[in-house]
Image: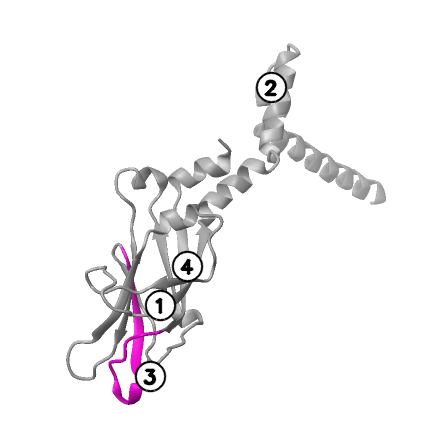
Amino acid sequence: MSLADQSLQFFPVSARVSVLRARGLRIKGKDGTNDAYTALQAGRETFRTPVAEKRAEPVWGGDDAAFIFTLPTESARAEQDGVPLQVRVLHRVPLGTDKLLGLTVINVHELRQDSARENPQWFKLLNKAGKADKERGEILLDIQFLKSSMSVSMIDLSDKSHSRLGKFKDKLRGKKKDGLSDSASAILPSVSQVLTDSEGEMEGETEGESQKRRRTN
């Protein structure tokens, strides 16, 4: 198993769901239209699109109609059935409870594993019991999966060449194999020695300048 595959077992993947449009909806508003919006929920994360006013076939799209949520890791998903994505299309009622036009529940983990799936994809809307009792229309969703930056950075770090410190350690190991000491003091002078030598050079230059001034005088 590659490092990329291993990282996906422990680091989360995000899903970006863009609500594009709906068609064939049941009409609940006046003049043969709806004031429709879409509400999405995945686990405890929720999202709601703007209201498409007075339209029989609402159109959303754009960043304000995009829902991003985190999928459980593979290790966490093994302990549960995954987090289903619930998508509900509702008609806004100024006074009272908004009316459900239809809903669909999507298993995003199965969707992610389907490499042959169409995207964007139309999803059939059902009633609140999850049954197709009447024709309730469809909703068009664009669902994309994004790898987390944490897992990507891990993969990038594993592929990068050794740092200078890593190369220095490798060099020390090579010298140790040749019978030399692998301590840093055997190769590099100590800090105190460097300072002493530097101070000596500075003192030497000062004495030379002093002697030059005496000759001049």
Q: Nearer the viewer, mark 2 or mark 1?
A: 1
Q: Position of residue 88 (x, y in %)?
A: 28, 66
Query: Of marks 4 and 3, which one's residue comes earlier in the chain?
Result: 4
Q: CA distance from mark 4 to mark 2?
A: 48 Å
Q: What residue range appears in magenta? A: 24-42
Contact between labelled residues 3 and 1, with CB atoms less than 8 Å apart? no
Residue designated by label 3 = 53
Residue designated by label 1 = 138
Residue 57 is drawn in which quadrant?
A: bottom left
| Residue 173, numbered circle | 2
Secondary structure beneath dot 4 equals: strand
Residue designated by label 4 = 16
Query: Of marks 1 and 4, which one's residue comes earlier in the chain?
Result: 4
Q: Which amino acid does the dot numbered 4 rest on?
A: Arg
Name the residue nearer the viewer: 203 or 167: 167
Secondary structure beneath dot 3 equals: strand
For disc 3, the neighbor class at 10 Å (few under 14, some 14 to 19, many from 20) is some
Q: Which amino acid does the dot numbered 1 rest on?
A: Glu
Query: Of marks 1 and 3, which one's residue comes earlier in the chain?
Result: 3
Residue placed at 58% from the left, 37% from the top? 159
| Residue at the bottom extreme of this rendering | 31
Q: Which amino acid does the dot numbered 2 rest on?
A: Arg
Residue placed at 50% from the left, 44% from the top? 153
Q: Which amino acid does the dot numbered 3 rest on?
A: Glu
Name the residue nearer the viewer: 194 or 132: 132
